[in-house]
Image: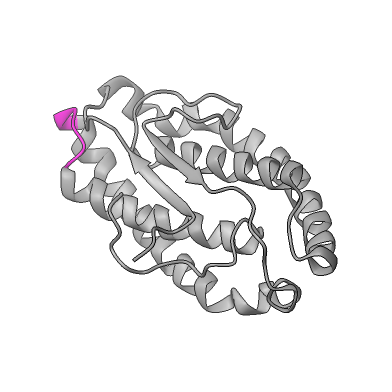
Amino acid sequence: MEPHPIRLVVTDDLRRSRLTVFFRLFLALPHFIWLALWGIAAAFAWLAAWVVAIFTGRVPDGLHGFLASYIRYQTHVYSYYYLLADPFPAFSGSAGYPVDLEVDAPEQQSRLKVFFRFILAIPALLIAAVLDYLLQLIGFLAWFVCLFSGKMPEGFESLSSYCLRYREQTQGYVFLLTQRYPSLSSEPV
C-alpha cells in the first residue's frame, strides 16, 4: 500500500526533563498563542486555497506550503504539550523536530471533492475528536509518569503518536493538502 501523503515521523528518544515536564503547560502557552494567531491566517489561506482549487483542481504551491507549515507547527506544539517530545519547539514550523510531519507536494484533486470537502470530512473530524480525548488522557497520565521516571513509556508514545497522526492527517485533508482520506490503519510512525 502506498504511504499516506501526510506522515508523522517520530525520532524521539523517550527521555524527558522532569523540570520542563512539571512546567509544560506554562512553557507551551506562548506556542498556543502563536498557534491561534497563525490559525487565523491559515483560515484565510484555506479559504483562498479552496476557491482556487474549485476552479483549477489544485492548491497553489505557496498556499500549500503555508498550510503545511501551519499543520507541521501544530504537530510540534501538540507533541511538546502532550510530552511526545522534550525539546522546546521553534515558532517557525520548520522540519527537524523529534516528532515531525512530512507533507507531500501539491497534487491534482477532484474539484467536486474539493467543493464538498468539509462535508466529506465530518466522519474523520468526529473520529479525530474522539482520538483527541484519548490523546489528552494519555498526556495527563504521561505527565505523572514522566515527572517521576524522567521517561515517556513506549506504549504511551505509540498510542499518542497514532492519535496525533490521525488528527494531523484529518487537518491536512480539511486544509486541502491531500485528497486522500485520513488512515485508521497502524502505519509505521
In which quadrant of the rendered view does residue 179 lie? Answer: bottom right
Residue 74, given in percent of the width and then of the height, sits at 54, 42
The part of the image, by quadrant, that contains residue 61 is: top right
Image position of 33 (left or right of 134) = right
Left or right for 50, reference 126: right
Task: Residue 108: give x, y in percent of width and height.
Answer: 67, 62
| Left or right: where 82 falls relative to 174 | left
Q: Is residue 149 magenta?
A: yes
The image position of residue 5, as x and y in percent, is 49, 55
Foreground pick, 162 / 77 = 162
Q: Is residue 151 above or below residue 87?
A: below
Residue stretch rendered in magenta on the structure = 148-153
Residue 11 located within the stretch drawn in magenta = no
The mark tally for this picture is 0
Q: Main secondary structure of the magenta part?
A: loop
Residue 145 falls left or right of residue 1: left
Q: Which residue does the image show at 17% across and 42% down from the upper left? A: 153
